[in-house]
Image (cartoon, rainbow, N blue to C red):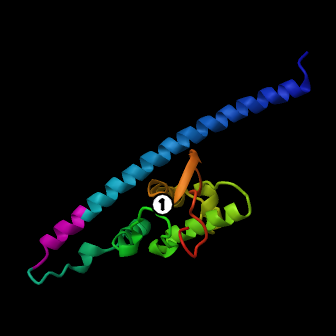
Amino acid sequence: MPSVVGLLEQHELVARRRVDGLREEADRIQAELAAAELEWQEWAIARRRVDTVLAPDDGTITEAEVTPDPRNADAQAALGDAAKSKSQVPVWRQGLAWSALSVDYQRILTALADRARLHQGPLTCQEMAAVFGMDVVPARVEALRSKAKRLVARGWLVERQPGRFTLAAGVTGPGGGS
């Protein structure tokens, strides 16, 4: 007769494998969703450009042509943010101040700096969304993941484990980049 502990370990292992499989599937679906949303945004931009080119001679576009889609509010906000000069992430270098980044990126760095100061370890994007008081839904989490990955690519953050972000060596408090 198997022991109770052995049975518990067996059930725990099965549950863990199921959780891991579901996480992998969720990551795959989230990546596919992000790619589809990006493609959709590119087509929307192309349509708006064609609308501008085909607009009457005075360059105005009629009200019906620019009626916003309420489901697309986040995408339009992201497109508007993309045009801001500070939304580009510079490559981190010694002495570069956090003020070189947009507020969203500064917010991510501040959360991770607080975690580092309290010796609490890395954060996932889902945890960041919760810390920021956002709805923990795939669209919000993927937006944070995109920003965090951009910060990793530019040397502000490191991702030692997949999906778990910390400040890069040398990047410290919000007063400056070093």
Percent of width and height locating residue 136: 60, 60
The residue at the far front in this view is 94
Q: Is residue 161 magenta?
A: no
Q: Which of 98 and 124 lies nearest the eye of the viewer?
A: 98
Q: Residue at x 22, y 64 (%)?
A: 47
Q: Residue at x 84, y 25 (%)?
A: 7
Q: Quadrant of the C terminus?
A: bottom right
Q: Is residue 96 left or right of residue 47?
A: right
Q: Is residue 3 left or right of residue 19?
A: right
Indicate the quadrant where residue 25 lies. top right
Q: Is residue 124 left or right of residue 14?
A: left
Dominant SS in magenta:
helix
Whether residue 134 can be seen here: no
Percent of width and height locating residue 104: 51, 70
Q: Which of 61 and 35 lies nearest the eye of the viewer?
A: 35
Whether residue 100 can be seen here: yes
Q: Quadrant of the N terminus?
A: top right
Q: Which residue range is magenta in the image?
A: 46-56
Q: Residue at x 81, y 29 (%)?
A: 9
Percent of width and height locating residue 75: 40, 65
The residue at the far top in this view is 1
Percent of width and height locating residue 17: 66, 32
The number of numbered discs placed on residues in the rendered structure image is 1
Q: Which of 134 and 115 lies nearest the eye of the viewer?
A: 115
- Compared with residue 49, is residue 145 higher up or lower down, i.e. above or below? above
Indicate the quadrant where residue 18 lies. top right
Residue under label 1, please give it.
147
Question: Tag 1's secondary structure?
Answer: helix
Q: Is residue 49 magenta?
A: yes
- Alpha-carbon neighbours of circle 1 within 10 Å: few (<14), some, or many (≥20)? some
The residue at the far left in this view is 57
Amino acid identity at mark 1: Lys
